[in-house]
Each structure stands twice: as structure tokens, then as C-alpha cells.
Amino acid sequence: MTNGARIACAQGLVRILKEEGVNLVFGHPGEQILPLYQALHRSPIRHVLMRHEQGAVHAADGYARATGGVGVCLASAGPGALNLVMGVATAYKDSVPLLVITGDVSTEFKGQNTFQDVPQAQVFQPITLHSYDVKKPEEAISKLKKAFMLLKTGKTGPIHLNIPKNVFSQTVDESLLDGELEYVHIPIYGLDEALKLMESSHKPLIIAGAGVIWSGAVEKLQEFVIKNEIPVATTYPARGVLPEDHPLSLGLIGLRGTEAANHAGAGADLVVALGCRLSERTLKGLGKTTIIHVNLDEEVLQGDINVKADAAEFLEKMSRLRFQDTGKWLNELQKYRSHHQVATGYDDTPLKPQRAINEILEASKEALVVNDAGSHTTWVNLLAVVREPSGLIFSGGFGPMGYGLPAAVGVSLARPKRSVVLVVGDGGFQMTLQELAVISELQLPIIIFIINNQELGIIKQWQELYYGGPYQVALENPNFVALAASYHIDGQRVLEPDQLSARVQKALILKKPYLIEVVVDPDEGIPLPEVV
């Protein structure tokens, strides 16, 4: 490289993206980010044009969850940037690694209340690990490099770069693109005491969180627990890190947890919370026990012994341990594995949602499942048997309606050889349905199941229980099959219990977009937890 050669900031940013292994980004162009789009146009990086910025960030989120890597999304200033907020908050709550780049009005117009000028970095600050308000091209380059360094070596979540339009076009010295920022390793603390406790435990339990996935520690975890015969429960986003049909897997713990996982949480003499937050929902599955909490994020540590480390590093340190015989403990837990089955054998018309969802899941065991938010979410979580990491993808921490459809786009593009099944309610589907255009354009093999109860079902259920009756929850729905057809996507409507399984299997064989509307009983509620 010639010393002193100059390059446009936008070109430098794109080069760094490529060097960091980014092959695909999601976005929606606008005036203040056009210089970056021009640089993208000249690069091998693929851009997926989503139909709404919220769709772009949810798609990047799904892509990240399905790959275990970083998702990237782009938007312009003002309305474009603020349309990302829902999805960025979703990723923040679930610690999903995202790089969010927004354009902004040029520096000479900032702070003058000009067209589309809002304090974007300040808006994103509470829902990101870092929100950088870039002022100079050199700063844009250094902050992007720093973002990748942090996401590769530190705690995960969204990082936001806000870059004015004129900064994209200004030049920087090419030498700034060379080299990587040096990562200073932070020593682990609390490790020795944790290891001693683990060696003396007779009834240990590991609660695995998404940090196991983000640190690339899934195989390490599986090898460790199988070698030492340690039972594993998981938080929502970590389901499948040990296949849920494995003898050592107890499934989800906490508010919607399995009986086996919650019995283990109540009876364990030691819990190792590995790469997870101990949220209020997870804590519902734990009794009075000693907790070793392992996490890179010091702010979430709340165990009796706290170990600041990523999951992979901690598992490497544990490899030298010699555990007590856990045979008696495992036999005790085995008695609870078959308990608490959800009844699904209904022949009613309209279909019971639990039967419909069970048949969808049973007929699509080889597919990746994406779940939206609503009453159907509970049935999917209770009935799914997740056999691989990210085999079930949904937003457990924030739960926005409308997440599922754009997230399925990201999942499908991340795992192009796999079919993707989306389970979504009639309410959530209508929040982001414009992304059908992307599914159709790219011919993604996504099978969309709309669970249609013609209302906001879970809200109606809360209203009936606590607020004197339903109000503003009935939905005047469109013809969903005809709507899909308008986007050149085939579909059909299912009304009878004996129709669904065969149609699911037929749709999966097609390897192309397909929509199945499943009409279910509007009066069938979900088992509600003891919270309001």
C-alpha cells in the first residue's frame, strides 16, 4: 500500500466490513446514507433491501442468532434511524451481536433543528452496548474497528455508529485501515472458589444461556457435561445447546420451564449459571441454593460466587475438574422428565391451537422454527423439542409482535440449505407483513403458519381474567391466502384437524415460500403464569 494514499470514508468502512467477514447486510436506503450504499454497490457484500427499517434490524437479528456471528443493518437519518429502535431494543435484551449503522444529516446542520435532524446517538444509547456519534472520517474508521473487536472479545449486543452524510464522503489515509486493535485480556476472578465448590457438589446443575452460543462453546459444553454426567437446563435463547431429547437435557427452566428443570433448580446443591442473565423468569425455577454465575457482563452478575469470563473460557478451566458421582441425582431427575405433558389430542372444530401447533412442529422436525409473540408463543415453547442451537428462534427478552416474519428472512439467508418454519399470530403477522415482498423476491423456503384466532388472544385472556372483559382485541382480518397471492406466494387455509399434518409436509417439500392460514378456536386460552 502506498503511504499517504487517500480513500473515501465510506469505501474504508465497506472494506473493513469485508475484512471482518461480513458478506450480507440488511437495510433500507435514504438520502443521508447514500454514500455508504454507493460504496456497497461496488463491493462483493450483498445488500438485502427490506421493506421497512424495523424489518431490516429484525432480519439482521435472525441472521446473527442463526449463525452465531454479527448481524449488520443500515438505515438513513431521522425516520429511518428511529424505525430501527424496536429491533435494536429486541437485540439488546437478548444480547444479540448487531452492528447498526445510521446515516445522519451533515455536520454543518447538526443541532439546528433542520430536516430529519434528531439526536440519534442519544436515542440509541440506552439500548446498545455503545452508541458512537461520529464527527470525523478517522473516527468512523476507528469506531468500526473497535466495534468488531468488542463484539469478538467482549459481551455481546448491538453497537451503533451514527455517521453524518458528509463524513462518509470525506477521505482518510488508507493506512488507518491496517491492523487490528489490541485486545487486553482481563483476568478471570472468582475462579478458584468456584472450582472447589463444583468438585464437592453431589447435585450440580448447569443453566446454559445464550453466551454459550455467542462464545462458540456449544461443543465444549456438550463434551463437558457428557463426560462428567452433569444435567443441563437452559434459558429461552439457549434451547438446543444440548439436544432436548438427550438424557442430560432438562429443557427450559423458570416461568415456562419443564417440571424436570424446575425440580432440578429447586433441589440442586449447586447451580452454575453459564453465559446467562438470571432474569426474574429464570429465577422462578430456582430454590435456595448456591449459585456460581459466569458472565462477561459484570453488571448482570448476581451469584453467591461471580466469575467474569465468557462461557468458552470458563469451560476450558473446568476441564481439569473431578466431579462427585451424580448417578443418584440423575435418577431422581429422570422421574420428572415425562411429567407435565401438554394435551394435544383434540378433534374439535375449530382447531385447538395446541393441536395445530403440535402437528406443525411434529411435521417439520428438520426445519428451523421462528416464533413470533402472542398466545401461540406459549404453545410453541411448551410443545417444541429443540435439538440444535438456534433450532427455535424468537425474542425471549423483549417479545415484540412482528419479530417473526423479518427474523425468518435473516434465518433463511443465514442457513440457505434449511427450510424455515414461521409460527405467527394473525395480529403479529400484520405488523410486518410487508416483508412478504422480500420472501417472494428471493424465493426463500419459508413456510408461514398464521395461527388465526381473529383477535389479540392473550390480551383478551388477561382482560377477561382481570379487567372485566375484552376491549379492542377483535381483528377484522384480510383474506390471508389472497394477500399472500398478491405477493406471488402460494397458500391455503386449514379448518379441519385432519388436514394440517399432510399439508405441512407437502409445503416443506416445495422448497419455496408458502403460507398456511390455520383457523383456531378463539376461546382457547393458554395456561397463564402466576404473574400480571
Image (spheres, helix red, strand yellow):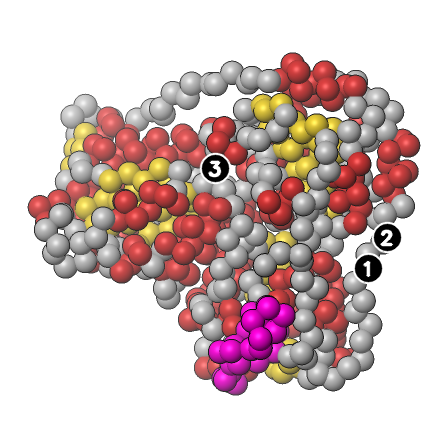
Residue 419 location (% of width, % of height): 62, 61
* Extent of the magenta region: 450-479
Which image quadrant for residue 87? bottom left
Q: Are marks 1 and 2 in contact (CB under 8 Å)?
A: yes
Residue picked out by circle 1:
341
Q: Amino acid at mark 2?
A: Ser
Q: Give the crowd class for mark 2: few <14, some 14-19, many >=20 residues within 10 Å.
A: few
Near-viewer residue (194 or 136): 194
Which image quadrant for residue 194? top right
Task: Determine whether, in the image, residue 353 is placed left or right of residue 79.
Answer: right
Q: Secondary structure at mark 2?
A: loop
Give the residue displayed 69% in from the left and 18% down from the top.
195
Q: CA distance from mark 2 to mark 3?
A: 35 Å
Residue 66: tell me if it is visible.
Answer: yes
Q: Give the crowd class for mark 1: few <14, some 14-19, many >=20 residues within 10 Å.
A: few
Residue picked out by circle 2:
338
Q: Amino acid at mark 1?
A: Gln
